[in-house]
Image (tube, rainbow, N blue to C red):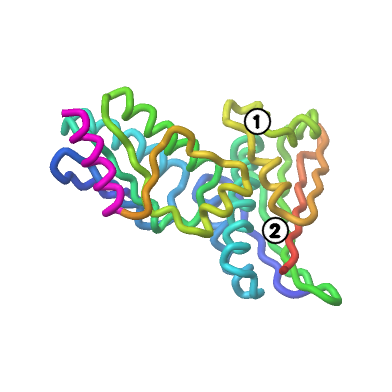
Amino acid sequence: MEVPLLKQGDFLIATIQAALTDADLLHLRTALVQQVVRLRSRGVIVDVTSLDVMDSFASRTLREVAQMIRLRGAETVIVGIQPDVAFAMVQLGLKLEDVSTALDLEEGLAHLSRKSTNRV
Amino acid sequence: MGNEIHVSINSDQDIVAARQKGRTLAAALGFSSGDATLIAAAISELARNIVTYAKSGEIQLIELNGSTRQGIQVVARDEGPGIADIQQALRDGFSTSGSLGLGLPGVKRIVDEFEIVSGEASGTTVTAKKWKS
């Protein structure tokens, strides 16, 4: 299951559309970092609205994505974590430390726009 | 005993299949969507341990019909190298595979009953039960 990446101005949007295997997640990580470099993106949004489960592997991989992209000078926002998924993550002790999150795509874009404006 | 489902675990695709079957069974048994997500997350961690440490094994999902309550039992079985120190494996943050750990202690936290039987020659069997609240 390939995750489509959409360029919107200075930002890159990845919309997860179904459950992802570990290999899919690693592929997404590589693709995002490559595209951020190629497109000189300032921000990345990963929309996880359709993700069925955020387990230890998924949360670790998303944290790595955010760290790698930060090293490129760009910001990552995870949007759309469903209430049930958030509940399970807390119970499992999984954290997305140092990764920005937002309610949905719109809020995520607003967050990134604020960050870019502040920097200019 | 009602429904019983077996899922062979040989690859990361099987992890997704197992957790989706677990969620479907939990929903059919009337678990809330929050609990069904917890069960799916637990299956995901247990199935991943099989792929990471033992390469192959199976997940068994069993419907439990107690006298006063219904539940779901997840059995993760492999014939891998076994867990040398179970106490250590159940500690938050411990891992021998370079991952973050958290798998087993997290699973133990979110289910109602949890048991590990592991031996060097016999592989590992993790049994987890969750009752409908």
- The answer to whether residue B12 is magenta is no
Q: Are marks 1 and 2 on the same chain?
A: yes
The number of numbered badges drawn on the structure is 2
Q: CA distance from mark 1 to mark 2?
A: 27 Å
Amino acid type at circle 1 is Gly
Q: Is residue A36 left or right of residue B93?
A: left
Q: Chain of mark 1?
A: B
SS at badge 1: loop
Looking at the image, the residue that sits furthest to the top is: A71
Q: Which span of residues is magenta-colored?
A: A105-120
Which residue carries the number 1 mark? B93
Local crowd size for mark 1, using a 10 Å CA cut-off: few (<14), some (14–19), many (≥20): some
The answer to which of B15 and B104 lies nearer the viewer is B104
Tell me the tag on residue B60: 2
Upstream in sequence: badge 1 or badge 2: 2
Q: Residues within 10 Å of mark 2 (few under 14, many from 20)?
A: some
Q: Could you say where residue A78 lies in the image, as x and y percent from the top left? A: 37, 45
Q: Nearer the viewer, mark 1 or mark 2?
A: 1
At horizontal 39% and vertical 44% (from top left) the residue drawn is: A101
Residue B62 occupies quadrant: bottom right
Prevailing secondary structure of the magenta residues: helix
Q: Chain of mark 2?
A: B
Secondary structure under tag 2 reads strand
On screen, residue B129 above or below B31: above
**In-image side of A62 versus B8 (left or right):** left
Identify the disc placed on residue B67: none
- Determine the residue located farthest toward the left in the rendered image: A9
Residue B50: image location, x then y, percent: 64, 42
Whether residue A116 appears in magenta in the rendering, the answer is: yes
- Residue type highlighted by circle 2: Gln
